[in-house]
Image (tube, rainbow, N blue to C red):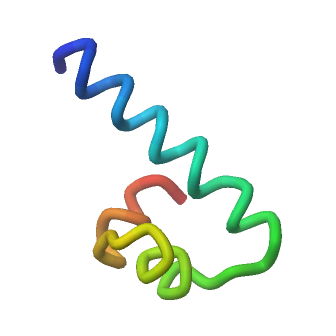
Amino acid sequence: ETQARQRAEEALQNAISPLLSLGLTVEQIAEALNLSVAQVNRHV
């Protein structure tokens, strides 16, 4: 992986984790971040 891709993955993780902590579902997070459910699930 390139450094840019690693940074992008880290940014997604940093965005997803707090939303999970707030009790949002994977589906809600995907919608809020304009991602697919599969993309969110990779970071759960």
Find residue 39 and report its horizontal and vertical position in percent. 32, 63
Q: Quadrant of residue 2?
A: top left
As drawn, 42 above or below 19: above
Horizontal and vertical percent position of residue 15: 58, 51
Residue at 47% in and 53% down: 43
Q: Quadrant of the N terminus?
A: top left
Check the image and report above or below for 35 versus 11.
Answer: below
In the picture as drawn, the residue positioned furthest to the top comes out as 3
Front-lying residue, 43 or 36: 36
Quadrant hosting residue 22:
bottom right
Q: Is residue 36 left or right of residue 10?
A: left
User: Is residue 44 toward the left or the right of residue 37 in the image?
Assistant: right
The image quadrant where one finds the C terminus is bottom right
In the rendered structure, the answer to whether residue 2 lies left or right of residue 17 reads: left
Q: Residue at x 73, y 56 (%)?
A: 18
Total label count? 0
Q: Which residue appears at 70% of the width and 67% of the height?
A: 20
**Residue 28 in the image, given as x and y percentages of width and height:** 54, 85
In this view, which residue lies farthest toward the left?
Answer: 2
Q: Reply above or below: 25 against 36.
A: below
Question: In x, y percent, where is residue 7?
Answer: 38, 24
Q: Against 13, is 29 above or below?
A: below
Residue furthest right as drawn = 22
Q: Residue at x 34, y 34 (%)?
A: 8
Q: Nearer the viewer, residue 44 or 20?
A: 20
